[in-house]
Amino acid sequence: MIKLLYIEDDLVDQMAFKRLVREQNLPYEMTLANSVQSAREKFRDGVFDIVISDFLLGDGTSFEYLPEIIQTGTPVILVTGTGDEDVAVKAIKMGASDYVIKDVDFGHLKVLPLIVESSLHNKRSDDKIKKLSMAVEQSPSMLLITDKVGFIEYINPRVTEITGYVLSDFAGTDLFNHHATHNSAEMVKEITETIASGNKWQGNTCHAKKSGELFWELTTISPIYDNEGHLKGYIKVAEDITEKKKAEEAIRKYSEELRESNASKDKMFSIIAHDLRTPFNGLLAFSDILSNDYESLSKDEVQEYIEVIRSLSRNTFNLLEKLLQWSRLQTGRMEFNPVKLSFQEQVEPIFGLLSANARGKSIELTGNIEKGLTVLGDQNMVHAVIRNLASNAIKFTPENGSVTITAHAVAANMAEIIVSDTGVGIEPENLKNLFRVENQLSTKGTRGETGTGLGLILCKEFIERNGGSIRVESEPGKGSRFIFTLPLAG
């Protein structure tokens, strides 16, 4: 039922309209008002779909209440007498939906149902358009609408909120070139070809805000057609997914770190299971021989077995020490106390410690340290790095070779240290795995010297903990250069 407020003070007109409603079985739920005052009261007390109002009433004109009714959005049809066309035009300008001129034979009543239907249809259309407009304006998504060539004609407030751009900033910009600045030419071509074929395109695109900051969006671009199938333009709907992309990258990075952490733990357990178990098997075996067959062994055999036990014990202790260092570093339990260090004073005791090993292979140990070079670092960690790298250099250098430690300032705030040798070098396929615990390498030296494979891994972590970096240059048969940096002391 259509709730209708009928405002008319003429009793004959009232009866004629009621008869029309009855005879045509019109779906009106009618409320009658016969004055300006009653019209106001009835309208304020009820809810109506439409109002039909005479212009001239006993206590005034409908212009006294029409603005109040029109403001609510309720359609109003004004009924005027002959000669009142100017009044009708004024009512239309005020916002009335339509008007009808009275005639003495009540012929105007016959068209009223059609005008009511038309006014209500227009009202529904207007409401739908307003709702759609509000949805576009208030949408949490960014919306851009173009003409049929692709030039941007409209952006909703969300575009301005996220990007800082207003519509005038897009003047002369077509939607496809809009994607060309921060996305690949292949993507722009794909968008253009997809849309040209009449299909919808969707994907992740990168853009710059007015501030210059880059952001990511999930973009959907679709062609717009009229009822006859003619292209009218394009609409782009976009969601800001920058935070989502950051979260995905954080998850990816965390997954990679977790994978590496698990690989490190697996490798540590593998070392414990193999590299510790193996020497202990040797220790137990030679200890059993000495314990059970001591009386039958010669002095030379006893001496040989003792040397083997001592060698196994020393190597096992070194491995255990490095495992404990590595474990403490991984769990954050290793103290870090950076202080000013004279680099020359760090190298000299290491040369003294390794001189016997070098002499045993007739290897020349030399240093070329910039005078007065002072670095900032944890003394224990810096000492361990130099000792490990120099010891490795001796280990992999044949007799009559040389090992050199060079150190000098390379920038305003960094020192570069190079431990070079004339040794056997490193195969290219092994270079990339030197500092990775999951690909730990343990190679025997030129005299069969054994190692744990953890030394270089510890060196890398110690250097990075002190704010430096490490790299290696090497060729098989031409020696190696381990190059690392440390901060200069201010």
Image (cartoon, rainbow, N blue to C red):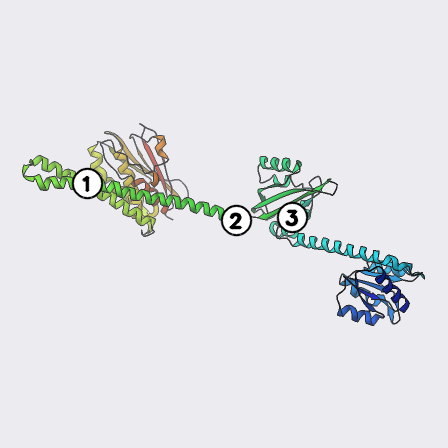
* Alpha carbon separation for disc pair 1 and 2: 54 Å
Q: Quadrant of residue 457?
A: top left
- What kind of residue is marked 3? Leu
Dot 1 falls on a residue whose secondary structure is helix
Q: Which residue type carries mark 2?
A: Lys
Q: Which residue is mark 1?
A: 281
Horizontally, residue 86 falls left or right of residue 208, namely right
Whether pointer 3 and pointer 1 mark residues with C-beta atoms closer than 8 Å, the reply is no
Check disc 3 and report its element: helix, strand or loop. strand
For marks 3 and 2, give the CA distance: 20 Å
Tell me if mark 2 has few (under 14), some (14-19) or many (20+) residues whose alpha carbon lies within 10 angstroms of its own. Answer: few
Residue at left 9%, top 42%?
291
Q: Which residue is mark 2?
A: 244
How packed mark 1 is, by other alpha carbons closer than 10 Å (few <14, some 14-19, many 20 or more), is few
Quadrant where the image shows the N terminus: bottom right
* Badge 2 element: helix
Q: Could you tell me residue 227's position as x and y percent? A: 74, 43
Are the residues at dot 1 and dot 2 in contact (C-beta closer than 8 Å)?
A: no
For badge 1, the amino acid type reads Asn
Decide: is 283 above or below 61: above
- When asked about the image quadrant of residue 355, the answer is top left
Front residue (pair 386, 120): 120
Mark sitting earlier along the chain (1/2)? 2
Residue shown at 78% from the left, 66% from the top: 68
Q: Which mark is residue 143?
A: 3
Residue 402: image location, x then y, percent: 27, 32
Question: Where's residue 8, x and y in %?
Answer: 86, 67
Question: Position of 82 compared to 385: left or right?
Answer: right
Q: CA distance from mark 3 to mark 1?
A: 73 Å
Query: What label does residue 364 carry, if any?
Result: none
